[in-house]
Structures are given as structure tokens and as C-alpha cells.
Image (cartoon, rainbow, N blue to C red):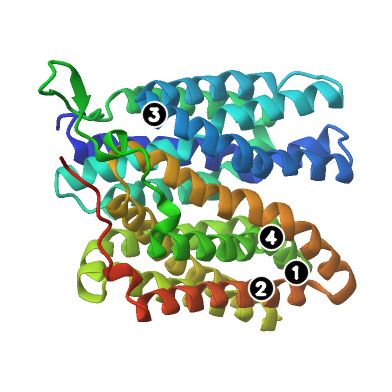
């Protein structure tokens, strides 16, 4: 086994990244509450990440694309994550804590778009199904989410941050193995050098003229509404129905485990159905699963719908990343991936999670999941419209000379 082999380097990166997040992400707000942070203050801290994803993610990703700094910015983002994780262990006033969380969120905002762009393009160059690399992240997240809760209960939260930081160092090493190819530079007739990447030769390239990309952006915003409502309130709803903390961890773990076979066979599914059709079916599955949440009254039933949602997430995540990569020139890859992230993980939760909280208080938690399910079904409708209109059959014309 050669670790620089793309089949291993991408898998190792995703395994380490989601192992690190799974070891602390689901438990971070519990840690804040144990430190005496109020619910309102936790809400403020939770709003920082989507805000920075919306503002700084696209800006930093675009800078990385234009300067060909994708790999160095990825490494800097991971390293800053190690430092800020360790700082969160220290006792500090709320204002300083908020500043550390802000610093962490800004520095990490371009990490996933850049990493996804690098790995999906590396997979395409070597004829590897991207889903078979990404599934290792789902596996590690499931294992660490299910297993770490009991450990931190025994060992304390300092162990959580030290473990997460150590895993992040592993991610840093894995990122060094990732293949990166900048646009090739060739001589021109004047004796100067010019990048062969068409978007550098023709900066007038406008992704918003690509109807398929616009449809994906709108659909990602809508499904981001559904994901925000699910991520914020699914554990609360499980506990409300009497599931307890064990089933809360199982809820997220089972959902992630169901992503594994789907990501493994995603290439085969795409070849049989087409990526655009698969994505619209995936949004439909997410919508059905959230409406199923709204109708459920027993904890075990929630687990079944969480598994269905995991299938839907795996299909649309891999499909969206691949579709954007297919339609993005090399020097736009991270930028466009970041725009999709900003729409789904930035703008959508910022606008709708507070509304979801009001719905939960005034209409009950089932209303939250009904709203999220309808948003996901509307996302499927947007893709249906794009497929019927032929948007995904359109070829993006980029001059090559």
C-alpha cells in the first residue's frame, strides 16, 4: 500500500477529518452548557459558523483558486483548527470564547470546499469513484460519534479536545499526501507564459449563466433548510419522545452508517440513473424522511427514518460535488464548491433555524420536521425542472484557444 496512491490518500483524509469532528462536534454544546454558558449564548456561538461559511468561505476559496493556494490554505486551515481546539479547553470569559470560536470558524470556512474540490478532481483524473473515498468519512464519523459519548462521560471534556486535536494532526499529515495539479503553463507566441486553464484565459466565465449550476445552488439552499432543522432538533425530538442520550447518539451513528454502502456504489448508481436524476431522488428521500419524523411518535421509528435520511444525504452529497466538478473549470472548483456550502450551511440555517425554533415553541417539534421535509421536496422539484428543461444536458462552452 502506497499512501500517496489516490485511492488511499483521499480515504485517509476523510477518515481522519470526520473522526476528529465526530469525537467533539456532537458534544461541544454539552461542554459549553457544563461550563455555565447560557442557552442564549450557545445560540450566539452556534450562529458564528454559518455566518462565516456564508461570508468568508467563498472569499477565501476564491482567493485559493486564483492564486493556486488550495493546498497551502487547506493545511493552514487544519493547523489553525488544532490550535483553536486546544484553546477551547482553557477557562475564559464569554467574549474571549466567542472570539476563539469566530477565529476557528473563519479559518475553517474554506477547508471542506477546498478539500472536496481537490479530492473529487483527483478521483476524476485517476478514474476512481469519488463516493468510495468519501464513505470513509461517514464510517469514522459513525464510529466516533457512537463511541465517544461514553468515553467523555468517564474521562472528561479535556480528553475530548486532546483527542480531537490529535486526530486533526493526522488529518494534516493526510492532507500533505493529497495530489494537487495547478493549471499547466505553456509558452505563447510572444514568448510569455499563459495558463492553459480556460477560466484564467477568459475571466468572463460566469457560473450563474449555467442553468444547471444555478438550479443546484437553489436546491442546495432548500435542502440546507431541511438539514439545519434536522441537525438542530432531531436529537431534541428523540429525547422528547423518551429515547435518551444513548438513542440520540445512535440516531446520528446509524444515519452515517447507512451512507457507507450508498457511497460505495454511488458510481454504479450514477451510471445507471444519471447524476441529476439521482440527486433529485435523493432530495425526495430526505423530504420523505423528515415528514416521517413529523409523523413518528416512537423513538425506534425515528431511527428508521434517520437511516433513510442517511441514504438520501449520501446520494445528494456525492452527486452534487461531482456535478459541480464536471461543470467547473480547474480554477473555479473550490470557489463553486464553497458557494454551494455557503448556500446550504451558511445562508439557509441563518435564515431558517431561528424560525424553526419559533415553530418548535409555538406549533411543536413535528411542525419543524414538516417544514424541513417540504423544503427538501421543493429542492427535488427544482432539479426536476432543470432536468426537464435540459439544463444538465447543456455543455458549458469554454474556449480553449
Image point (68%, 84%), residue name: 295
Residue under numbered circle 4: 235
For this view, does 271 lie left or right of residue 258?
left
Question: What element does badge 1 sit on?
Answer: loop
The mark that comes first in sequence, 1 or 3, is 3
Q: Which residue lies most toward the top here?
A: 191
Q: Residues within 10 Å of mark 4 (few under 14, many from 20)?
A: many
For this view, does 98 lie left or right of residue 252?
right
The mark that comes first in sequence, 1 or 2, is 1
Q: Are marks 1 and 3 in contact (CB under 8 Å)?
A: no
Residue under numbered circle 3: 66
Q: In front: mark 1 or mark 4?
A: 4
Residue under numbered circle 1: 242
Residue under numbered circle 2: 299
Image point (49%, 74%), residue name: 382
Q: In front: mark 2 or mark 4?
A: 4
For this view, does 328 lie left or right of residue 127?
right
Amino acid at each position: 500500500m502506497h499512501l500517496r496512491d489516490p485511492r488511499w490518500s483521499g480515504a485517509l483524509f476523510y477518515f481522519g477529518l470526520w473522526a476528529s469532528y465526530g469525537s467533539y462536534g456532537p458534544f461541544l454544546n454539552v461542554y459549553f452548557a457544563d461550563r455555565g454558558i447560557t442557552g442564549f449564548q450557545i445560540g450566539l456561538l452556534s450562529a458564528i459558523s454559518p455566518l462565516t461559511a456564508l461570508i468568508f468561505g467563498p472569499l477565501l476559496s476564491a482567493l485559493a483558486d486564483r492564486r493556486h493556494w488550495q493546498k497551502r490554505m487547506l493545511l493552514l486551515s487544519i493547523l489553525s483548527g488544532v490550535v483553536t481546539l486546544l484553546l477551547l479547553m482553557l477557562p475564559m470569559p464569554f467574549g474571549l470564547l466567542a472570539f476563539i470560536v469566530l477565529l476557528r470558524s473563519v479559518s475553517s470556512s474554506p477547508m471542506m470546499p477546498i478539500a472536496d474540490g481537490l479530492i473529487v478532481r483527483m478521483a476524476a483524473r485517476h478514474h476512481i469513484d469519488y463516493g468510495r473515498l468519501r464513505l470513509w468519512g461517514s464510517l469514522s464519523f459513525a464510529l466516533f460519534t457512537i463511541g465517544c459519548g461514553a468515553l467523555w462521560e468517564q474521562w472528561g471534556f479535556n480528553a475530548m479536545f486532546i483527542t480531537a486535536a490529535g486526530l486533526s494532526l493526522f488529518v494534516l499529515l493526510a492532507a500533505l499526501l493529497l495530489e494537487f495539479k495547478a493549471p499547466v503553463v505553456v509558452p505563447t507566441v510572444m514568448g510569455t507564459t499563459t495558463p492553459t486553464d480556460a477560466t484564467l484565459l477568459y475571466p468572463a466565465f460566469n457560473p450563474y449563466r449555467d442553468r444547471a449550476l444555478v438550479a443546484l445552488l437553489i436546491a442546495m439552499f432548500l435542502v440546507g433548510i431541511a438539514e439545519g432543522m434536522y441537525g438542530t432538533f432531531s436529537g431534541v425530538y428523540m429525547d422528547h419522545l423518551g429515547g435518551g442520550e444513548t438513542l440520540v447518539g445512535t440516531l446520528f451513528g446509524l444515519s452515517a452508517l447507512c451512507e457507507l454502502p450508498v457511497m460505495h456504489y454511488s458510481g454504479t448508481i450514477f451510471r445507471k440513473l444519471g447524476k441529476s436524476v439521482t440527486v433529485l431522488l435523493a432530495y425526495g428521500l430526505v423530504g420523505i424522511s423528515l415528514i416521517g419524523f413529523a409523523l413518528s411518535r416512537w423513538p425506534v421509528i425515528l431511527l428508521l427514518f434517520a437511516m433513510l435520511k442517511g441514504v438520501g444525504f449520501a446520494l445528494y452529497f456525492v452527486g452534487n460535488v461531482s456535478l459541480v466538478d464536471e461543470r467547473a473549470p480547474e480554477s473555479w472548483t473550490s470557489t463553486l464548491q464553497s458557494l454551494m456550502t455557503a448556500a446550504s450551511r451558511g445562508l439557509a440555517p441563518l435564515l431558517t433555524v431561528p424560525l424553526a425554533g419559533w415553530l418548535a415553541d409555538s406549533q411543536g417539534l413535528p411542525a419543524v420536521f414538516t417544514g424541513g421535509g417540504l423544503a427538501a421536496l421543493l429542492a427535488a422539484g427544482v432539479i426536476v425542472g432543470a432536468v426537464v428543461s435540459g439544463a444538465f444536458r447543456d455543455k458549458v462552452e469554454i474556449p480553449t484557444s
